[in-house]
Amino acid sequence: AAWLTVLVALLVFLGRTEGAGIEATLIAVDLSGFMANEDYPPSRLQCQYECVNLITTVKTQNPESTVGLMTMSCGEEDCPTVVVTPTMSSDSLSDQSEILTRLHKLNQRPKHPVQFERAMEVGFMSLKNRPNKNQSPRIVAFVGSPLRIESPDELVKFGKTLRKHNMAVDIISFGESTALNTPILQKFVDSVDREGNSHLLSL
């Protein structure tokens, strides 16, 4: 977990130095059954939790930046959902505590597969409606399971929409499915990227 956290820290650093200053960041997590695997000790879920903790700590160092949380998993009734919105608060520590508390509860029931395309759409709408338009919008997504992309071409097309709205996307892809996920995720990130503001980290 330690080395994964270090790599994510580097990714966050790149986002900070190449960004426009203050940010509204939405962290999208993978809560599929694959995340219970223990190939990243103690589990993929715990590694993801530690990385979310680090990202919220770094991002909220600027009191004008905000962080939110969403799940990308989708069952029959619950689809990708923003559980903590990236809105302005007077207390960044309470915001971080709320995110970690909600994520801890969500970690108790990993089950449904990730609906990546839908999650990006939900994340886009959440950030598009952010109260402070001076914040640069960014999605940070964790993917630790094999993705089933219904239409790769449409995903790339949507990436261009994100780029048009000056949104950045960072993706951390890990586990046994990176060989499957990396090609389409790289195309998606490339379609979003504007002057190096978006990144894919495949482990």
Image (cartoon, rainbow, N blue to C red):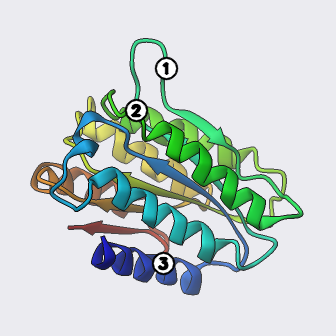
Please state if 78 lies on the left or on the right of 24 as rendered: left
Residue mark closest to the camera, 2 vs 3: 2
Q: Which residue was labeled with disc 1?
A: 78
Q: What secondary structure is found at the residue carrying circle 2? A: loop
Q: Which residue was labeled with disc 2?
A: 73
Task: Please tell me whether residue 83 is drawn above or below residue 21 in the rendered image.
Answer: above
Residue depicted at 36% across the width and 41% down the height = 155
Residue sitting nearer the eye, 85 or 38:
38
Residue depicted at 17% across the width and 55% down the height = 175
**Residue count near mark 1 (Cα–Cα under 10 Å), binned few <14, some 14–19, many ≥20:** few
> Type of residue at label 3?
Glu
Q: Position of residue 159 (x, y in %)?
A: 44, 50
Residue depicted at 11% across the width and 53% down the height = 176
Based on the displayed image, in which of its 4 quarters is residue 50 positioned?
Answer: bottom left
Residue at the farthest bottom position: 17
Per the model, the C-alpha gap separating discs 1 and 2 is 8 Å
Q: Position of residue 3 (x, y in %)?
A: 28, 79
Per the model, the C-alpha gap separating discs 2 and 3 is 30 Å
Per the model, the C-alpha gap separating discs 3 and 1 is 36 Å
